[in-house]
Image (spheres, rainbow, N blue to C red):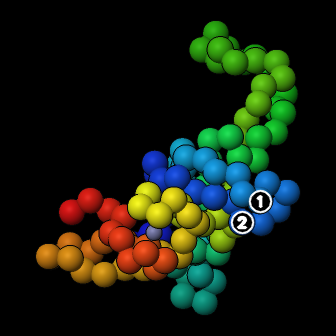
């Protein structure tokens, strides 16, 4: 189970955008090849997030077909690593660390600051 999911509100905790909040648009899971076991698996060190309004860069988008509507110089969000953001707790409205616990027969995330459950049961 991952600590940050799509649709979560997160706050940037490092870099030149410290304190900026945004909604997670997409979670990019980092896949890596384990050279020792010759297997493919998920590497959390490479997990990144696309966050609305965070790490926005100018991109020169070339028109390639009629289907590409946004061309020219456009604003585009670039991925941010999961370790550079913290989840904003919906209960206490602060960036908080996330823990896991079992409620009923479901594993849910909770805020370590105020102990409130983040996921709906
Ligand atoms: Zn909280």
Q: Is residue 81 visible?
A: no
- Quarter of the image for the C terminus: give it: bottom left
Vertical relation: 61 (above or below) 67? below
Crowding at dot 2, Cα within 10 Å, few <14 / some 14-19 / many 20+, comes out as some
Residue at 81% over, 39% down: 57
* Quadrant position of the N terminus in the picture: bottom left
**What element does badge 2 sit on?**
loop
- Residue 58 position (above or below residue 109): above
- Quarter of image, ligand 1: bottom left
Q: Secondary structure at mark 1?
A: loop
Pick whichever, 59 or 15, lies toward us.
15
Depicted 106 relative to depicted 90: above or below: below
Q: Position of residue 73 (x, y in %)?
A: 84, 23
Q: CA distance from mark 1 to mark 2?
A: 5 Å
Q: Quadrant of residue 47?
A: bottom right
Check if mark 1's residue and mark 2's residue have beta carbons within 8 Å: yes
Give the image location of residue 65, x and y in percent: 67, 14
Q: Position of residue 119 (x, y in %)?
A: 32, 62
Quadrant in the rendering for residue 60: top right
What residue is at 58 percent from the left and 66 percent from the top? 95
Left or right of 35: which side holds 75?
A: right
Q: Residue furthest left?
A: 104
Quarter of image, res 34? bottom right
Of 55 and 93, the residue lying toward us: 93
Residue highlighted by disc 1: 18
Q: How many marks?
A: 2
Mark positioned earlier in the residue sequence (1 or 2): 2
Q: Nearer the viewer, residue 80 or 30?
A: 80
- Residue at 49%, 77% (x, y): give it: 113
| Left or right of 13 on screen, residue 28 | left
Which residue is denoted by mark 2 in the rendering?
Answer: 13
């Amino acid at each position: 189970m991952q600590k940050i999911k799509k649709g979560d509100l997160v706050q940037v905790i490092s870099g030149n955008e410290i304190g900026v909040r945004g909604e997670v648009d997409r979670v990019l899971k980092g896949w890596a090849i384990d050279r020792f076991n010759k297997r493919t698996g998920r590497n959390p060190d490479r997990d990144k997030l696309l966050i609305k309004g965070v790490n926005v860069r100018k991109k020169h988008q070339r028109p390639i077909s009629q289907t590409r509507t946004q061309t020219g110089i456009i604003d585009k969000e670039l991925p941010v690593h999961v370790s550079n953001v913290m989840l904003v707790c919906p209960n206490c409205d602060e960036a908080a660390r996330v823990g896991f616990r079992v409620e009923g027969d479901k594993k849910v995330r909770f805020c370590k600051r105020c102990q409130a459950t983040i996921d709906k049961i």
